[in-house]
Amino acid sequence: MKTIILAEKVLINGAWQHNQVLSIEKGVIVDIASLSRFEKDETATIDERIRGALIPGYVDTQVNGGGGVMFNHAPTLESINVMAEAHLKYGTTTLFPTLITDDIDTIESAAGAVSEAIAQAHPSVEGVHFEGPHLSVEKKGVHLPRYIRSLSDRELATYTRNDLGQVLVTVAPENVPCDIIRDLVNQGVIVALGHSNAPFETVQNALEAGASGFTHLYNAMSPLTSRAPGMVGAALLNDSVCGIIIDHHHIHPKAVELAYKVKGPNQLMLVTDAMAHVGSSDDTIAFFDTHITRSGNKLTTPDGTLAGSCLDMQGAVTNSINDIDISIEHASTMASITPARFTKIDDRINGIAVGKRANFLVINNESTLLEVWQNGSKRHCAN
């Protein structure tokens, strides 16, 4: 059955098109036409008229939790469902459940849950992100040092499974040799660099071996200084994609502005690094052998360590516009097109285009989120 939608304004290939008619069949956009062309077909009727502007649904590559659930604590399909639903109402139509540093049994359980989601064609899940455990203790953040370790054959076998959708792994290059990075990439795994104290040269070697991105630019990585460019310097200099957390706590707005001016919207992608607090009214949630507390919109452990975020993707887009003066067109690219391309799912999820999944959002002139559409069905509306 075909659904036909008329929208006042649609963001297509980074430019606004007015009075566009989208034809959707089996969750995929099969045609986009101007209203004048559409009206020539006297047999077709419009099912819904949308007042507002359409932008692509958001793609978040770093979702640790949501809806009161942490993926590490309950690595199950049920948890994925709860997390996906929590983030969907904030515009995230595609996400990568993210498992942070943990033991091998938890890693394998998470892989099993994602495999179930992929097998069931879960509308939100396109793969999995293993953030650790092959990181630097010096830049561990809230990752538990007792689990940080080198990459074993058992973990390699998990990361290279062919039933997990697209696999993304964050590693510290001083803890993972270039030959292993090269092997992972050759087997289809996307390797990002992060939680690392590596010098510039080590980072460069990892990039040459096939690493193609950086997990949360600036945070938990060797800084840029006059005599040691570090991982930050390598990230800014190279043509690689950098995730960035724009939540008022992880990064100063001027540091974001610098990254945006250097990288541009096609190499800078918004991520949330979201914990279980997103979509939950609970302010204190268990985290391994401690807990994480929300104060305002900041998450910390009892010792004051910043512990992920309670940021959602709509908030990240809003902060990009309000804090950095990034246009809605570019903020949309950073929240959808760039992460889709980085994770190699752009053959099916890549903006509002013919042949792509009908995942889009309705916003008003103030960029406020009004509606969320996923696979051609309206899923959430603003209260």
Image (cartoon, rainbow, N blue to C red):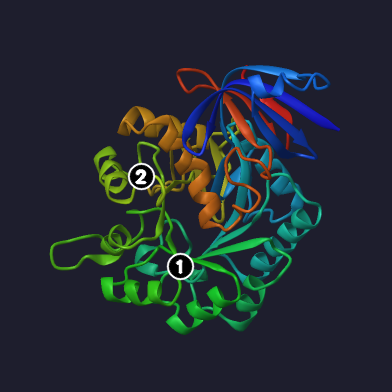
The single residue placed furthest to the right in the displayed view is: 1
> Image quadrant of residue 119?
bottom right
Q: Is residue 3 visible?
A: yes
User: What is the secondary structure assignment of the residue under circle 1?
Assistant: helix
Q: Quadrant of the N terminus?
A: top right
Is disc 2 in contact with disc 1, using a CB cutoff of under 8 Å? no
Above or below residue 356? Residue 111 is below
Q: Which residue is mark 2?
A: 250
Q: Position of residue 71 (x, y in %)?
A: 63, 52
Question: Of the residues shown, which amino acid type is indicated by label 1?
Answer: Pro
Q: Relative to residue 213, is residue 230 drawn left or right?
A: left
Left or right: residue 77 compared with residue 314? right
User: Along the line of sight, which residue is nearer the eye, 371 or 171?
Assistant: 371
Q: Quadrant of residue 50?
A: top right
Between 290 and 167, the one lying in front of the other is 167
The tally of labels here is 2
**Amino acid type, callout 2:** His
Please report the residue visible at 47 percent of the width from the left and 60 percent of the height from the top: 143
Q: Is residue 23 above or below residue 245?
A: above
Left or right of 266, for residue 226: left
**What residue do we see at 41% from left, 70% from top?**
172
| Residue at (47, 17) in percent of width and height | 365
At which x and y percent is residue 154? 64, 79
In three-dimensional space, the C-alpha distance between marks 2 and 1, rounded to whole angstroms, equals 21 Å
Label 1, on which residue? 145
- Neighbour class for label 1 at 10 Å: few (<14), some, many (≥20)? some
Position above or below: 49 against 268: above
